[in-house]
Structures are given as C-alpha cells and as structure tokens.
Image: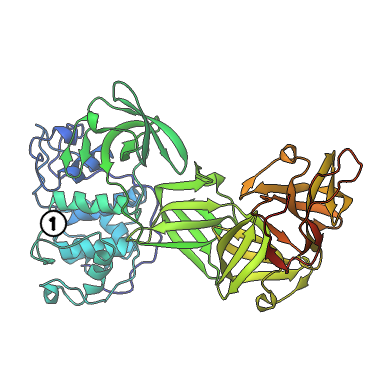
C-alpha cells in the first residue's frame, strides 16, 4: 500500500529517461503521435503529441494511442520512477526480504518504490498490481516521488470530503502546484481510474513547470521568432541565451492553443515553444500567446541572474535593502539603452526595473545606466526635487536610501539642502540615489564671450576680460540642447559655472530674454575697449552667488 507518513526525502533526479510501459505493447516503434487516428480532437491531443515528441509515450500498432484506456497500478509506478530518471537504479534494485504480489512483472520497480518511500514494505504483498490506478493513488505517488511536503490547505472541490484524510496532504501538494487541477464540475474524483490521456497531461505539466527535465537528447526551446526561412522550415529563435537556428522536421506538428495550424502561422516576433534534439531539429512546435500587461513592476539593483535546473532565476535588492527572488521566462526581454541583450550581458549591481505577470514571473527587465545631472536645486519636497540643468527644470524622485554629501567628502542631511544650491546628482530611471552639494566650490557668473583659445576661454565679466581654463568635461548648452565649443561666438551672452578656476558648464542665453545670475547695475550702451576682440555691447554686473537669481530686462543697444 501507499506510504502514509515518514516518506522518503531523496532528491529527484534531473534527467527524464522515460518510456511508458504498456503491458500489451508489442511494437515500440509505433507511429508518431501526430499520426494517431484516435487522438484528433481529443481534449488531451496536444499533450499526447507533445509527450510523443519527447519520446516519453508510444502508441499501439495500427496508429492507435487509446487515450481513454486505464493505466495499471504497477504501470503507474513504472512511469513515475522512469520519469524521475531512476530506471537504471530500479534495474539493480535489491529484492532481498521483500514479498511481492502474485502476477507482477515490475518487482524491481516496486522494490525501488519501497526504498524511495513511495510504498510500505508491509503493504507490498497485498497490492493488486494489475488493477487500474486511481487519481488519488497517482497524486500520492507523485507527491512522494517528487519529495513535496504535504499541503493540508482546504481544497475547494465539491467532493473534497471524499478524499481519504490520510492522503489529503499529498493531493493538496499536487493540486497546489497545478499538476492536477480537477475535472469538470469542480470535482477531484479521487476513486476514478486514471487514463493514458490524463497521465500524459500530468507529465506535460511536470515538464512545463520544470519539476522534471525533458528526456535527453530532446529538450525544450522557448523563444521569439526573429527570422523565418522562405520555405518556413528554418527559423531563428531568440531567448535569454541568444539566437538559435531551428530546422523543423518534415512531420513536425504545430499547435496554436489546442488546434493544429499550418506553418504559415510562423511569423516574426511570435513566441514559440519547440521540442528539439541536440542538432536543433524540431519534432513539435507550439505558438505561445503574447505576454499580458504587467501586473506589477519592481525596481532595484541586480544581485544575480542565473540559470538552474528549473530555468532562470533573478535576485533583486530593493531600496529597502530587501532581496527578492523571481523566476524568469526563458524568452524574457532584456533591454539596455533600447538594445536587446542576453542574460550573460546583464551585469551585477545594474539598476533594473522588472515587469511581472500574474504568476510573479519576470517577462521584461530594463537596465538603466547612471546619469550625472548637475544644476541648481530649485525645489526640495520630501521624496521629490526639482533641478534646473542646462536651462531646463526637471522633476526627480528621491531614493529612500539617498546618500547626500557636501563637496564629495562631508556627509550631510537631505534636509540641509536649500533651493539655490548647486548640486551634482546620480540619477537612475529618474530617481536620485546620490546628491553632492557643490555650492561651496562652484561659483556662478554671467558674462560675454571674448574668445576661445585651445583649452581656455576669455569672458568679459564686469567690464573686465578674464581668462578661465575649460574643464575637460565642460558642458555647453542652449535651451536644453547640447552645444560644442565651436558654437561659441564672440559677443555671446552666457551663464557659466566655475570650480577650481575651471569652467565646468556654459549656458548660451538669449540676450533679449535670458536669465542672468547677479545684480544688474547698468544696462546701457558703452564704449568698447580698443582690443580687436572687445565686445560691442555688454551687461555691467556685480556677480553674486548662484543663490541670487533674477530675470534680466532687455538690453539697451
């Protein structure tokens, strides 16, 4: 009998080397499932075809599969053990001290089932191995074999009370994972015999949900079509691992939903699943639906993106320093600066925003590169701030863990920042993570360009021509657009900022409508110096700190 408690904790093997054992089957080289004459239109047709493409199930001579035929109890044991890759271990199982029921041909498998904790030694002699297996028994055997903990959460089936209480936790564990989902009418039918079609469906779910791996040399390939050959027999499929060229076998069936479709449905950007061999030859294909809109999004710094036995998994550290782990679709879209990248290209500590579907599984991840924004703090309000940079006011969110310094050295509180401070902010996805207050070292001026010579610039400030060195990364802009040094002309009016006697930013301004830093003393025509490069017009200013701002009027010319 089935083991009720104290079941085995052995780890399930990764490989799926499994052939469904049919007691009456004489021809193991049966026709491909796509040619089975008795599965077309059957509710489990797609699962049967898929399991056949994996080489997991075979049919009867004459092109039959007999999807509604019951499975013997001992056949169910054989199927599950082979599904978990324990077939070779079963072949060498120790039969010493075990009593077997009469008429069994699967003694080694039953012996291994006892060793793995699926069956009890005491109940073994009383089994009827040839009787049909029930849905309750198969659910319990799967739970024990897969080493799932029993789940006693109440089941909402109409016939839940008919499930033997000694095995209800096993059924709960299988149902919770979606491996068995009940029958029409919201019933579980625990005593109903399980059929070949139902077994194919459960095995398909085990592989699809990565509880077990496909049987080598077959494997599952999920991705997005990026190229289609003229004959529709050759495709390029892209996923997190990169691009793969797939060649469809001559009799490769193609499904969309539960219906078979023509290869003309293979179009670029369609999501697909193929069963392929080591040469990327496909024996089964299925068109998958597009991802639904994100149920929620999460931002944080990437800790890891790794591929395990169950596919890709991503770990993200949030602003609250909490580490969250998410499963990732094989064909999830990874973007960096608008460019699609592969999983190996996604670097640790990158700041990413992930989009999650209804199962909290990642289908999009976008990487944001750090941007340094320098400008004047206009407004600071709790979790938001406004910075004027390159003449443009921009709103930013402030990270809960923002780091604030003064002149890159001294720590300071966010509340100590004041409007008018000149700041340098590190921004990721419009969110500020670091702020450096530079007001003590940066001075703002207004003036008029005299000339540019190499790495120096000459500017008339307060009627006096002054020379400044240009910072290697000097920013030049006008109306929020970047400009080059070559765009500076003699007589241009500018606001500029200086640190360590080097000009770090220059804003070209409209002399009629510009904003200047400083206090206007006069606005009148004056006589230019005798220098050839002297300007013909100028503002006369007394320069003040960047915190003093006023809008100029129109110059008298």
Q: Is residue 406 above or below residue 91?
A: below
Q: Is residue 551 above or below residue 220?
A: below
Q: Which residue is mark 1?
A: 194
Q: Position of residue 378 (x, y in %)?
A: 63, 68
- Is residue 285 or residue 236 the one in the foreground? 236
Q: Position of residue 196 (x, y in %)?
A: 14, 49
Q: Residues within 10 Å of mark 1 (few under 14, many from 20)?
A: many
Horizontal relation, residue 212 to residue 422: left or right: left
Query: Does residue 49 appear in the picture of this structure?
Result: yes
Q: Position of residue 433 (x, y in %)?
A: 62, 65
Horizontal relation, residue 219 to residue 438: left or right: left
- At mark 1, the secondary structure is loop
Residue positioned 29% across, 54% down in the render: 206
**Colour setting:** rainbow
- Is residue 58 or residue 520 the one in the foreground? 520
How many numbered markers are drawn? 1
Horizontal relation, residue 175 to residue 92: left or right: left
Residue positioned 80% across, 68% down in the render: 440
Query: Does residue 118 appear in the picture of this structure?
Result: no
- Is residue 421 or residue 119 the one in the foreground? 421
Residue found at the very far right of the displayed protein:
530
Quarter that holds the N terminus: bottom left
Quarter where residue 26 is shown = top left
Q: Position of residue 144 (x, y in %)?
A: 30, 65
Q: Is residue 112 above or below residue 54?
A: below
Q: Is residue 64 above or below residue 544?
A: above
Residue positioned 12% across, 40% down in the render: 65
């Amino acid at each position: 009998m089935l083991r009720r408690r104290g079941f085995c904790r052995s780890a399930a093997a990764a490989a799926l080397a499994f052939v469904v054992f049919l007691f009456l089957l004489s021809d193991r080289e049966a026709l491909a499932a796509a040619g089975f004459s008795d599965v077309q239109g059957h509710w489990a047709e797609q699962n049967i075809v898929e399991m056949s493409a994996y080489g997991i199930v075979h049919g009867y001579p004459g092109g039959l599969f007999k999807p509604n035929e019951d499975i013997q109890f001992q056949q169910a044991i054989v199927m599950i053990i082979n599904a978990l890759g324990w077939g070779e271990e079963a072949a060498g199982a120790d039969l010493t001290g075990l009593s077997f029921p009469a008429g069994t041909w699967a003694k080694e498998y039953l012996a291994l089932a006892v060793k793995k904790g699926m069956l009890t030694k005491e109940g073994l002699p009383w089994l009827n191995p040839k009787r049909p297996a029930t849905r309750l028994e198969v659910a319990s055997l799967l739970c024990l074999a897969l080493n799932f903990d029993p789940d006693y959460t109440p089941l909402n089936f109409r016939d839940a009370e008919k499930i033997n209480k000694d095995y209800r936790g096993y059924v709960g564990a299988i149902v919770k994972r979606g491996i068995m989902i009940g029958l029409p009418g919201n019933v579980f039918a625990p005593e109903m015999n399980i059929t070949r079609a139902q077994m194919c469906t459960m095995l398909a779910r085990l592989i699809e949900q990565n509880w077990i791996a496909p049987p080598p040399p077959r494997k599952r390939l999920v991705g997005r079509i990026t190229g289609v050959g003229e004959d529709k027999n050759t495709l390029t499929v892209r996923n997190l691992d990169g691009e793969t060229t797939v060649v469809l076998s001559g009799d490769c069936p193609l499904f969309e939903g539960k219906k078979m479709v023509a290869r003309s449905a293979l179009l670029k950007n369609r999501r697909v699943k193929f069963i392929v061999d080591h040469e990327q030859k496909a024996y089964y294909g299925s068109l998958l639906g597009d991802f639904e809109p994100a149920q929620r999004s999460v931002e944080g710094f990437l800790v890891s993106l790794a591929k395990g036995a169950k596919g890709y998994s991503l770990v993200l550290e949030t602003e609250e320093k909490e580490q969250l782990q998410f499963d990732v679709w094989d064909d999830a879209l990874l973007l960096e600066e608008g460019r699609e990248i592969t999983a190996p290209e996604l670097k640790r500590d990158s700041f990413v925003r992930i989009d999650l579907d209804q199962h909290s599984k990642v289908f999009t991840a976008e990487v944001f590169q750090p941007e340094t924004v320098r400008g004047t703090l206009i407004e600071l309000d709790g979790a938001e701030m406004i910075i004027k940079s390159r003449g443009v006011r921009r709103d930013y969110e402030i990270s809960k863990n923002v780091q604030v310094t003064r002149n890159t050295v001294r720590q300071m509180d966010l509340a100590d920042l004041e409007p008018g401070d000149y700041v340098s902010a590190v921004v990721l996805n419009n969110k500020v993570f670091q702020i450096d207050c530079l007001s003590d070292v940066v001075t703002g001026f207004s003036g008029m360009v005299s000339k540019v010579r190499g790495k120096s610039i000459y500017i008339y400030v307060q009627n006096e021509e002054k020379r400044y060195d240009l910072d290697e990364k000097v920013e030049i802009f006008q109306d929020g657009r970047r400009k080059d040094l070559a765009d500076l002309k003699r007589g241009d009016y500018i606001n500029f900022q200086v640190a360590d006697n080097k000009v770090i930013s220059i804003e070209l301004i409209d002399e009629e409508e510009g904003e200047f830093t400083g206090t206007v003393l006069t606005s009148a025509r004056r006589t230019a110096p005798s220098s050839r490069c002297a300007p013909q017009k100028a503002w006369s200013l007394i320069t003040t700190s960047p915190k003093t701002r006023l809008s100029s009027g129109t110059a008298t010319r």
